[in-house]
Image (spheres, rainbow, N blue to C red):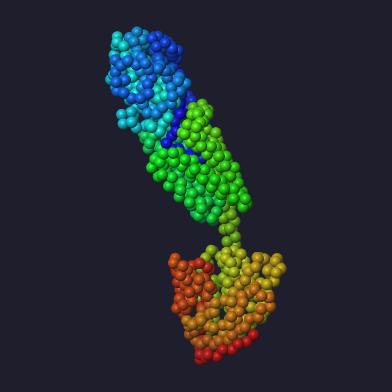
């Protein structure tokens, strides 16, 4: 931009790089719209020399009288401006001995009747007009013979807008001299080096109307098109992130990627509206500033979710600071306003770079893919911010303020390429992660399907029925499959052998470990409860100490709680327990001797206890998922509530615990004594 001035605020270049490639693709049609420079006569250095005319359109580059300041008398044709220096507006004012300035400045030029007549003759007698092209954000008001005839938006209220070219009509008839006076202004935060008047052309209305259209096309290409392309690109990536999040709700980094892109698109949209002169520089600066700091905070959150970082307290302080900084900048605290963006961007770059580097060191390869591109983008962007800060303090010359390069109509900086690489690396890594997660989920679903087939062996859907006992069960896994299991084996003497247990862990591996115990149970010929538990303990201990001997059993240490009971037709109940919850009879828990779970100590012995059940008694066995159910306030379902519902049906007990707040697999089995065998007794027999 010819005007060497610091923008009030700018979105971090990390959020503006994605669509440079799109602009390159669209560059040929944009170049095709660029106007060819009109043929003009070389401007003469002598103030009194006539303006050479080669065509009906003439550039009025010199001699312009120039003065810094503001005085309404300077629009008067009678005002003597002979003491003002003359300048060529096609050259920077600083190169012609004019110091940098802020605020107001005036340009004056006199056109004599002969000059006007020659241009009018070349235009075939058509009305003459001026095409005035301001320099970027300069606000201009044009006076012809002391009468205001045209202005840019914001010139009357002293509000900075992007200033497009505009036409100024001239009085009819070239028989009198004309005094052209142009009042220019830019805001106090803008340091002007080149000048705010870029070009003035004199010619017929028809010819300059074509030039005006070409100037507007150039304005669209340089100030609007790239921002609209970037906005569209960021919104497309935002939609991509939202779609990935909908597909994988447990990966919140996709959601934060979408929010990140929306914040970047907001800044680009504000830039496009500012380029179309629809919003002022001040409004654009505020929106861009807030969008930039929101972008920083959201990007940090995205990286946190992407890397799975758990220690987030210190990082949260940086995020909160980034959201507070724009409010501090609005307070206009002098030099601190210049230092805050530098400090905030430095902290942002350090935090994100450190998070990616630590994740890469932990073995997260996709974080390493983003680390180097982001480091380069962050370093170049921060260096540009520091250079702008030093230029604002007048410690460096203006050419160091955000140096830019041109490729056709496209202007870009060094950081744009590194930012582009970084954003493409984000897209590539996110898509790669999505594909890998999708494949893992497919494999997991296949494993769960296989585990469910195993689960059907662990949790029988149909229980044996006898003339003496009625059985009912309910099974509610917390993750599709789990480690709970039970088996009911009818024996030849009309007794039932019940084994009820819970293997440590959850999911597929717990189910496979349970299946091993069930297989060992079915190979056991003895039906004495204590003997059964001893056999299962040996199986579990042997599998852990010699992995591979027992198929499908994880070699990692594991244990299992287990309750084994044999119920005879006459109501005799023999129970042995290996660390499991005791059963409930008619709402009261049976007292059993304490013992260690299976798989803890080799050679453990288990004590068995004998009870007697009568007709109408209900025996309930359940897993710890009932007792350990937890509500939203952290309160356990507990033993008291369990005892209160223990005389209900198995399904009722399981559903009550689930509604309270399920955190583990819930398994409940109830046995109802249907035949009367003998009177109730308190007799208890202990044996080994």
- Of 220 and 243, nearer the camera is 220
Using the image, determine if residue 427 lies above or below residue 512.
Answer: above
Point 36% across, 26% down: residue: 104
Residue sitting at x 49%, y 27%: 409
Q: Quadrant of the C terminus?
A: bottom right
Percent position of residue 447, x then y: 60, 60
Question: Viewed as shown, does residue 373 lie left or right of 155?
Answer: right
Work out whether residue 389 can be spotted.
Answer: yes
Q: How many marks?
A: 0
Q: Is residue 462 above or below residue 236?
A: below
Residue 495 in view (yes/no): no
Position of residue 542 measured from the top left corner of the image (x, y, whole percent):
69, 71
- Between 96 and 129, the one lying in front of the other is 96
Above or below: residue 656 compared with residue 221: below
Query: Residue 268, located in which quarter of the rendered image?
Result: top left
User: Residue at coordinates 69% horizontally, 78% vertically from top-left?
Assistant: 603
Q: Quadrant of residue 442?
A: bottom right
Would residue 314 be found to the left or right of residue 523 on screen? left
Q: Quadrant of residue 531?
A: bottom right
- The residue lying at 54 percent from left, 87 percent from top is 612
205 versus 375 height, above or below: above
Q: Residue 671: x percent and y percent? A: 52, 80
Q: In the visual, does 546 lie left or right of 243?
A: right
Q: Position of residue 519 (x, y in %)?
A: 65, 72
């Amino acid at each position: 931009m010819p005007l060497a001035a610091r923008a009030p605020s700018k979105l971090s270049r990390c959020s503006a790089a994605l669509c440079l490639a799109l602009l390159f693709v669209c560059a040929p049609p944009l170049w095709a719209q660029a106007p060819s420079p009109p043929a003009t006569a070389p401007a003469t250095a002598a103030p009194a020399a006539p303006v050479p005319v080669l065509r009906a359109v003439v550039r009025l580059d010199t001699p312009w009288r120039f003065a810094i300041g503001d005085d309404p008398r300077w629009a008067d044709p009678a005002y003597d401006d002979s003491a003002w220096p003359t300048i060529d507006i096609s050259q920077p004012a600083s190169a012609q001995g004019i110091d940098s300035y802020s605020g107001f400045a005036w340009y004056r030029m006199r056109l004599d009747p002969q000059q006007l007549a020659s241009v009018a003759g070349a235009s075939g007698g058509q009305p003459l007009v001026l095409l005035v092209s301001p320099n970027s954000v300069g606000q201009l008001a044009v006076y012809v013979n002391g009468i205001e005839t045209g202005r840019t938006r914001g010139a009357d209220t002293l509000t900075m807008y992007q200033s497009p070219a505009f036409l100024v009509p001239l009085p009819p008839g070239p028989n009198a001299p004309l005094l052209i006076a142009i009042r220019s202004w830019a805001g106090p935060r803008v340091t002007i080096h080149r000048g705010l008047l870029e070009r003035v052309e004199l010619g017929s209305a028809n010819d300059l109307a074509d030039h005006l259209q070409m100037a507007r096309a150039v304005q669209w290409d340089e100030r609007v098109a790239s921002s609209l392309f970037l906005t569209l690109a960021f919104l497309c990536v935002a939609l991509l992130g939202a779609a990935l999040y909908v597909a994988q709700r447990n990966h919140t980094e996709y959601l934060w990627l979408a929010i990140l892109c929306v914040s970047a698109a907001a800044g680009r949209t504000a830039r496009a509206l500012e380029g179309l002169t629809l919003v002022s520089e001040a409004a654009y600066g505020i929106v861009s500033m807030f969008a930039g700091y929101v972008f920083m905070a959201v990007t940090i959150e995205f990286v946190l979710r992407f890397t799975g970082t758990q220690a987030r307290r210190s990082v949260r302080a940086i995020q909160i600071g980034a959201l507070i900084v724009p409010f501090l900048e609005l307070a206009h605290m002098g030099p601190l306003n210049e230092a805050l963006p530098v400090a905030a961007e430095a902290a942002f770059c350090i935090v994100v770079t450190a998070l990616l580097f630590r994740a890469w060191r932990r073995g997260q390869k996709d974080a390493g893919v983003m680390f180097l591109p982001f480091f380069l983008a962050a370093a170049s962007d921060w260096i540009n911010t520091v250079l702008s800060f030093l230029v604002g303090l007048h410690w460096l010359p203006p050419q160091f303020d955000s140096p830019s390069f041109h490729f056709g109509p496209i202007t870009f900086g060094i950081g744009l390429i590194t930012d582009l690489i970084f954003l493409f690396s984000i897209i590539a890594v996110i898509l790669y992660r999505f594909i890998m997660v999708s494949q893992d989920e497919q494999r997991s679903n296949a494993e769960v399907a296989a585990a469910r087939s195993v689960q059907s062996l662990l949790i029988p859907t149909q229980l044996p029925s006898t003339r003496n006992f009625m059985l009912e069960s309910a099974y509610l896994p917390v993750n599709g499959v789990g480690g709970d299991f039970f088996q009911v084996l009818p024996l030849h003497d009309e007794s039932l052998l019940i084994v009820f247990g819970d293997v440590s862990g959850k999911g597929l591996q717990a189910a496979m470990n349970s299946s091993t115990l069930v297989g060992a149970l079915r190979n056991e010929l003895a039906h004495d409860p204590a003997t059964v538990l001893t056999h299962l303990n040996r199986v579990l201990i042997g599998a852990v100490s010699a992995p591979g001997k027992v198929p499908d059993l994880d070699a990692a240490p594991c244990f299992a709680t287990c309750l084994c009971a044999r119920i005879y037709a006459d109501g005799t109940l023999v129970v042995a327990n290996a660390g499991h919850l005791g059963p409930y009879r008619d709402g009261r828990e049976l007292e059993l001797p304490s013992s260690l779970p299976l798989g803890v100590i080799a050679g453990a012995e288990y004590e068995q206890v004998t009870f007697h059940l009568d007709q109408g008694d209900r025996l309930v066995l359940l897993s710890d998922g009932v007792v350990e159910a937890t509500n939203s306030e952290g309160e356990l379902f507990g033993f008291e509530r369990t005892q209160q519902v223990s005389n209900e049906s198995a399904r009722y007990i399981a559903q009550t615990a689930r509604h309270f707040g399920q955190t583990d697999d819930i398994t409940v089995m109830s046995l109802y004594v249907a035949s009367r065998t003998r009177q109730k007794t308190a007799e208890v027999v202990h044996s080994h």
